[in-house]
Amino acid sequence: MTTALRAGDAGHPASVLPREFAAVMRPELPGLIQEVIEEIRRSYPEYAEVLDGPYSRAVHLIVEHNLTSFVDQVAAPDTSTVQRDKVCRMFGRFEAYEGRSLDTMQAIFRLGARLALNRAKGVLRRLNLPAGLMLSFAEALLAYVDNLMEVSREGYQEARAEMEQGQDIQRQRLLRQLLSDVAVPRATLVELAERAKWQLPDEVTPIAFSADGRPDRGAISEDVLVDLGSPLPHALMPGSVDEHRRAFMDAAPHTTRAAVGLTVPLADAAESLRWARRALSLAEAGILEDAPYIHCEDHLVTLSLFADPGLITALAKQQLAPLAGLTSNQRDRLIHTLRAWLDTRGNVLRMADQLHLHPQTVRYRMRNLEKVFGDLLASPDHRFATELVLRALELRSRRTRPAHRPGLPSVTG
């Protein structure tokens, strides 16, 4: 039986293909993406190191994005290509910084088109679709690939020009001024931005890199100001981290160590970078969970608690002073009981479940707590301060104890 497909809307670049064909193509994407990657590895040995190395997930995302974007345009010809173009320019820049030739990069695109055409032939035969549809598909795909190559070429040539003309130097000058603790006149920033060919945004998101975990320059988007040569490498991204940027951050090599600050007005960029560096130091200390990119917005409570570690230590001494005369084991038992009491609002049965104890044992411990702390437990201010302290001590203890042990550090830890 022949499947009936209606022609697409006239007036759109993808109108040569019926929109319904997108539904036929979409299930083929996972297999096609994998086929393209494997064929690149086989046909171009120089890419094997990239495909098997730390940037393999990023390369997979680029292939996936370009193929999926074509299907999306078939389904809706007026779909925006802004994000697709960003990905292509980034790929072109990566290739330039890696020192590969423009011809090799373009050959990769043609290889993908060839494999997509072969797969489309099989689909058309299997579904008994009109033979003329194959010609339309080939025309649309080749036009699409030509566009991908053109945009990627722009990114490649931009990166080459930056390397040859020292464009990064201009951008680093602008970056230093934007992150300066001294107010810089707007006119000066505008002039520097024009020289650096960078449009001043209203909001920015800084990134702090570890000195031994900085990414390759070619893996950073062209619209990001970056200084990887600094003892404290960092970058400044225009606007916020959208889902596409976050996807590439999540696909970064595990050797990358970075923290993404909060999106703030341009004038607050230096302060947000300090928060990012604080998050990076907390991750290196084992307090925040390790990941290639840590996002400050995911850890605001922890960042607040450790804004001044010295004050937390002083607060811990003050709030837990009644426990100072006890043995280490006694102190640990009562601290765990106190935390459960705060977590459950004093519900003995829930405390018993949380502590894996008999309710009667919990009641006994509570009597000991009341004996030690007296009326302090009835004070809202004391309860609030104590909860802050216990939360901070729990996070801090991640540096010094195995995951399976519940023990907390000493009051002065």
Image (cartoon, helix red, strand yellow):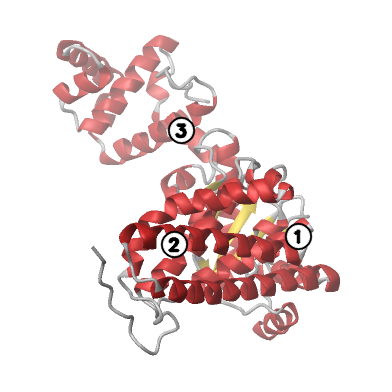
- Give the Cα distance between marks 2 and 3: 54 Å
Query: Toward which corner of the image does residue 373 lie, by quadrant?
Result: top left
Foreground mark, 3 or 1? Answer: 1
Read off the residue under disc 2: 120
> What secondary structure is found at the residue carrying circle 1?
helix
Q: Which residue is mark 1?
A: 97
Q: CA distance from mark 1 to mark 2?
A: 34 Å
Q: Decide if residue 187 is on the left or right side of residue 142.
A: right
Q: Is residue 338 visible?
A: yes
Q: Residue at x 38, y 76 (%)?
A: 17
Amino acid type assigned to the residue bearing label 3 in the image: Leu
Q: Are marks 3 and 1 in contact (CB under 8 Å)?
A: no
Label 1 vs 2, first from the N-terminus = 1
Q: Secondary structure at mark 3?
A: helix
Residue 192 at x, y = what percent?
73, 80
Q: Please state which of residues 268 and 3 is positioned toward the viewer in this rendering.
A: 3
- CA gap between label 3 and label 1 equals 40 Å
Q: Is residue 263 left or right of residue 350?
A: right
